Image: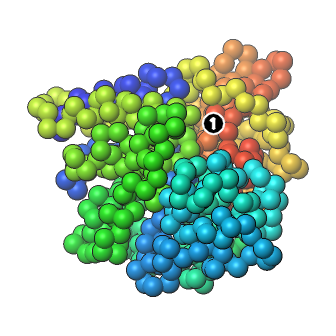
Amino acid sequence: MDAAGVLAFLDAVQTAGDQELHSVALLRHGRVFARGWWEPYGPDDATLMYSLSKSFTSTALGFAVAEGLVTLDDKVVDRLRPDGEVGPRTAAMTLRDLAAMASGHHADTLDDPRVRDAADPALGFLSIEPESDPGTVFAYNNPATYTLGAVLQSVTGTTLTAYLRPRLFEPLGITPGWWDQRPAGRDIAFTGLHLTTEALVRFGQLYLDGGVYAGRQVLPEGWTATALALHTPNPAEPNPDWSQGYSFQFWRGRHGTVRGDGAYGQFVVLLPEQDAVLVATGGTENMQGVLDAAWAHLLPAFDAPTSTEADAALAERLEHLEIATDRPDPLADRAADELRVVDVREADGGWTLTLEEAGRTYTVAVGRQGWPRTDLAVADGWGVLVAAHGTDAGDGAALDVVLVESPHRLRVLTGPAGSSVTWHTTPLWRPTIASLATPRPRA
């Protein structure tokens, strides 16, 4: 592997302006070639994976099928038994259809009030009759995955996290972070799982190696071939790496790749032809741009001539990564309407920032030279871990508050005219600090 290609990939992302990485790992033949974290993110941070969570729900499906708890052709209504009559297409919908994003609906139903406002979103989903027969059309549909997760948690009698713990997490040596729940006691399935970069590395290598890890068959025999196969064509998707077809909660990509991914740049990319795995976490809305940079610079680096100079330069680069706070930020233009700056005052080595959100007050330590961390108490037993850094800016200051258990950060600008707070990538669904809280200590 030519380290110069990896350096070129990092340069391309850094100079793009609308792309940002928080961690990266590249493996070849089961060995780590490059790995690093952009400060303030670090190896121990279990970060929100957004829709990369779906690939773990798919994995739970594989175990449940192997254990005879379900079959792929089980009718969803036979497992969840909704109240009242359902339409013929809903009645025909199978677990296979849910896993393949082929429920027959033509669009995501997440914002439909029958799902959004339901006490049980899975039953709300089943009240929406698909426009086409299940198995015939692709539509990326978050409640389909939620409903698949609801079935799995019903038949296993436990959460997805608890079910996967002895089957997947423990064999891989992974300590899972929190999986967001709705209602309480039910892991959301389509989003909400928090994991470290190292956990993603082991998960990706497991799937690349056919379910074998450290010489042990961890996944059911044959599941990787089933899960990663092309199940639903989707040529109408607008981005090239999202229009190559859909597997079971994994995307097919260009260059023979398959990947799990999540909003704002959470990636586990399998490159079978190169026997490689690319893992990245980040904060970007241009996810296609990150993949374009990978194809342009990483693919030519496989089996290319190497140099000790490039190897040394890459090692040095990976030891001194830090997110950019000193350039115009095209994403930091969304006012954090729920947040108000109460106070900013000079403190030893930086500032003390006080924010108010929905009646809660958060006090954040902000460093000039580093990224001090503060665990913000959101509610009894719940918190949000932040790291903050600032610089003087004219007659005020520019402060960046990174929510390290997520891809998100806040930018606070202060000055004689007052203060403003904006999001760099806005949390999906509920743009608040409190919406990103996780249990203390984690379950």
Q: Quadrant of the C terminus?
A: bottom right
Q: Is residue 26 visible?
A: no
Front one among 341 and 205: 205
Query: Percent x, y for residue 100?
Result: 50, 58
Front one among 11 and 153: 153
Tell me the residue at 70%/26% (across/down).
333
Depicted 402 relative to depicted 317: above or below: below
Depicted 164 relative to depicted 55: above or below: below
Front one among 274 and 437: 274
Tell me the residue at 55%/51% (across/down).
137
Q: Quadrant of the N terminus?
A: top left
- The amino acid type of the residue labelled 1 equals Thr
Query: Percent x, y for residue 10?
Result: 36, 30
Query: Percent x, y for residue 246?
Result: 45, 51
**Relative horizontal placement of residue 212, taking residue 387 as reference (left or right):** left
Q: Quadrant of residue 187?
A: bottom right
**Relative horizontal placement of residue 2, taking residue 135 as reference (left or right):** left
Q: Quadrant of residue 193?
A: bottom right
Tell me the residue at 46%/53% (across/down).
232
Residue ID for mark 1: 425
Q: How many marks do you count on the picture?
A: 1
Q: Quadrant of residue 129?
A: bottom right
Label 1 SS: loop
| Identity of the residue furthest to the top in this view | 394
**Relative horizontal placement of residue 212, taking residue 410 as reference (left or right):** left
Q: Residues within 10 Å of mark 1 (few under 14, many from 20)?
A: many
Tell me the residue at 48%/34% (across/down).
239
| Coloration of the structure image | rainbow
Query: Percent x, y for residue 291?
Result: 40, 35
Q: Is residue 277 visible?
A: yes
